[in-house]
Image (cartoon, rainbow, N blue to C red):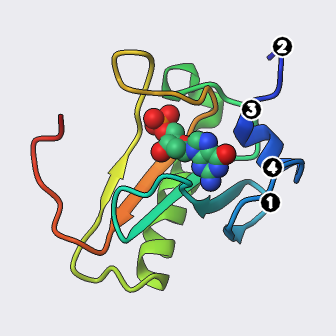
Amino acid sequence: MSGEKTIFKKIIDREIPAEIIYEDEFCLAFNDVNPQAPIHVLVIPKQEIASMAQLNHSDQELAGHLMLTVAKLAKTLGLENGYRTIVNTGTEGGQTVDHLHLHLLGGRSLQWPPG
Ligand code: DGP
């Protein structure tokens, strides 16, 4: 990947602050700066992958790890009544930061369908 660092890469590199709630060898989780629910966490891989569309077969284990991390955090955060996980992909998918991220939203009743 070339060009300027994304905002999320800067968070990984501790160049800009974030409310980090979880970290391991492969991923980082932090509170979204613009929360859409009482709990709104972003789970991102440390590896620079631009979006879900850029995942390939060799990322299978990492992709699973990201999902399992969301599930683990949801439990830790007390979301036993449910939560929503969203991965916006590309322009029409509403993706604004070109570093793969899983939104974990919870703490209120969420509507469907989304906009
Ligand atoms: P998306 O639209 O799926 O690309 O979501 C990007 C999310 O990233 C959006 O909900 C706001 C959040 N975000 C953008 N910049 C920052 C930042 O500097 N810090 C934090 N914590 N979140 C950010």
Instruction: Report the Cα–Cα distance between label 1 and label 2.
Output: 23 Å
> Seen in the image, is 33 located left or right of residue 23?
left
Label whose residue precedes the other's in the sequence (4 or 2): 2
Which mark is nearer the camera, 4 or 1?
4
- Residue 102 position (above or below residue 20): above
The residue singled out by tag 4 in the image is: 12
Q: Quadrant of the N terminus?
A: top right
The residue singled out by tag 2 in the image is: 2
Name the mark on residue 25: 1
Which mark is nearer the camera, 1 or 2?
2
- Name the secondary structure under disc 2: loop
Instruction: Report the Cα–Cα distance between label 4 and label 3.
Output: 10 Å
Instruction: Report the Cα–Cα distance between label 3 and label 2.
Output: 10 Å
- Residue at horizontal 73 percent and vertical 66 percent from the top: 23
The residue singled out by tag 3 in the image is: 48
Label whose residue precedes the other's in the sequence (3 or 2): 2
Evaluate if marks 3 and 2 touch, with contact meaning CB atoms under 8 Å apart. no
Type of residue at label 4? Ile
Type of residue at label 2? Ser
Residue 103, percent from left and from top: 44, 51
- Name the secondary structure under disc 3: loop
> Seen in the image, is 24 located left or right of residue 32?
right
Place residue 8 in its image quadrant.
top right
Instruction: Please tell me in which quarter of the rendered image ligand 1 is found.
Output: top right
